[in-house]
Amino acid sequence: NAGVTQTPKFQVLKTGQSMTLQCAQDMNHNSMYWYRQDPGMGLRLIYYSASEGTTDKGEVPNGYNVSRLNKREFSLRLESAAPSQTSVYFCASSEWGGLSSYEQYFGPGTRLTVT
Amino acid sequence: EDQVTQSPEALRLQEGESSSLNCSYTVSGLRGLFWYRQDPGKGPEFLFTLYSAGEEKEKERLKATLTKKESFLHITAPKPEDSATYLCAVPPLGGATNKLIFGTGTLLAVQP
């Protein structure tokens, strides 16, 4: 099993450009998440999808959109990138409900720089 | 406001020198506390779930404990391969299932 995979691994954008980060999991998990990680700020939840067909805002959703394409795939889109979105982005997945929903499995991350 | 605070921010140990990392939280009605390990350039990896005060979990040289206000991650006779950032997380009060608040982590460096 590959677990959680993310593409691309690295990306440099200019201010105003758009891009989509892709995430896929092969663990048959119902729930998927997008986080960003910044120095001194810890991991912050951008959006999550409790199950296929649903998405909800997390702590820092502004400037982002998501799509739960199917049970396996969850994408994050930046419509007009800003330097404040320079960060490391992690996708994660888990079971839905109960304590196991907090045992989240993370991908390797996408390092995004916006100039 | 729900908060998770980890200390110290960084810790340097000699191989074999035992120590503890701290995670304190202000969430009322705790619904579990979770420890993760993050290696440089990688995503976090789940380590432990602690659900109630007094509970302990062990894995190799790591032992996690929980009280009503904080959790400790004890590292006994660490090895260089234990070097990583250790994160703790709790579900926010009233938050939907699945959501977690993460601390900023303790960066552990174990020197041979």
Image (cartoon, helix red, strand yellow):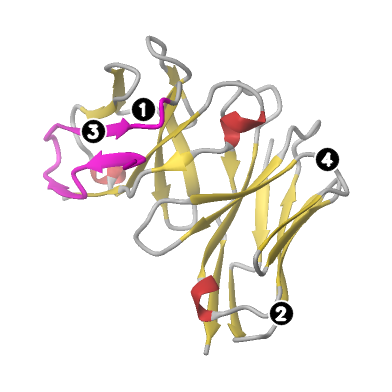
Determine the residue positioned at 35% across, 39% down: A4
Q: Secondary structure at mark 2?
A: loop
Q: Which residues are magenta?
A: A1-28
- The residue carrying mark 4 is B52
Circle 3: residue type: Gln
Q: Which of disc 4 and disc 2 is earlier in sequence?
A: 2
Q: Secondary structure at mark 1?
A: loop
- The residue carrying mark 1 is A62
Q: CA distance from mark 4 to mark 1?
A: 35 Å
Q: Position of residue B83 (x, y in %)?
A: 51, 73
- The residue carrying mark 3 is A22
Q: Is residue A31 above or below residue A25?
A: above
Q: Position of residue A33 (x, y in %)?
A: 42, 31
Instruction: Specify whether residue A16 is painted magenta.
Output: yes
Mark 2 falls within which chain? B
Circle 2: residue type: Ser
